[in-house]
Image (cartoon, rainbow, N blue to C red):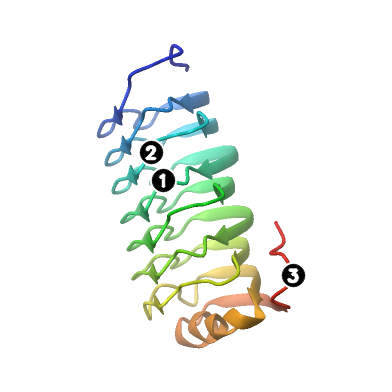
Amino acid sequence: LSFEPGSRLEIIGECAFESSRIESLTLPQGVIAIRDRAFHEAEIGTLSFEPGSRLKTIWYYAFKSSRIGGSLTIPRGVWAIMKGTFQGATIETLSFEPGSRLGIIGECAFKSSRIGGSLILPPGVTDIRSGAFQGAEIGTLSFEPDSQLAGIWGDAFNKKSHIGSLILHQKDARLKEMIVQRCKAEIEKVQILPDSEATPE
């Protein structure tokens, strides 16, 4: 599936590609919103965004129970992962574009999801909400240095959440207590890096 160069597409509507099977999809630069359940239960070989993507909002359950291969990079303009956006999704690799403006990970955003490789949360994330990672399986979870995270809701993670490795910087070591003790996630390994060391990818 492809779009003509210079496409004026701005919105992917509700249920637009629900239950679709797509080998490869690159969304045009002008897309600013992906609406509710747009890719619910879709299977996508690779999903990408044109350089300079203007995407700002991915709405409720947009990728619920979807399967996304390859590497998915969320454009820098996205300010929130909304309620249930990736709930139950299987994603081979997930990352955020450098300079990400992400501030909120919403309710059940990644509940029961499966994320391979490393998930590095941008420093601007201030709030991880109820159920965000309940029952999720994540290879490695880490935070960029100088995390502004102010709160993780008590049930954002639970005993069914499995994290292979949690990597934190020394100045952000407070997050360990939030995730391990308050949220009771199952974590195989916790690594605290010196503040001068870059977060591994």
Label 2: few (<14), some (14–19) or many (≥20) C-alpha neighbours in 10 Å? many
The image quadrant where one finds the C terminus is bottom right
Residue type at the position of mark 3:
Glu
Q: Which residue is mark 1?
A: 77
Which is nearer the eye, 129 or 124?
124
- Dot label at residue 197: 3
Element marked by disc 3 = loop
Q: CA distance from mark 2 to mark 1?
A: 6 Å
The amino acid beneath tag 1 is Gly
Measure the alpha-carbon separation of dots 3 and 1: 26 Å
Query: Residue 195, located in which quarter of the rendered image?
Result: bottom right
* Along the line of sight, the residue nearer the viewer: 187 or 198: 198
> What residue lies at 54% left-to-right and 83% top-to-bottom?
180
Residues under numbered marks 2 and 1 in contact, where contact means CB atoms less than 8 Å apart:
yes
Q: Which mark is residue 55?
A: 2
Identify the residue at horizontal 51%, vertical 65% (top origin).
123
- Image coords of residue 115 (percent x, y): 57, 54
Find residue 134 and report its horizontal and vertical position in percent.
Answer: 43, 68
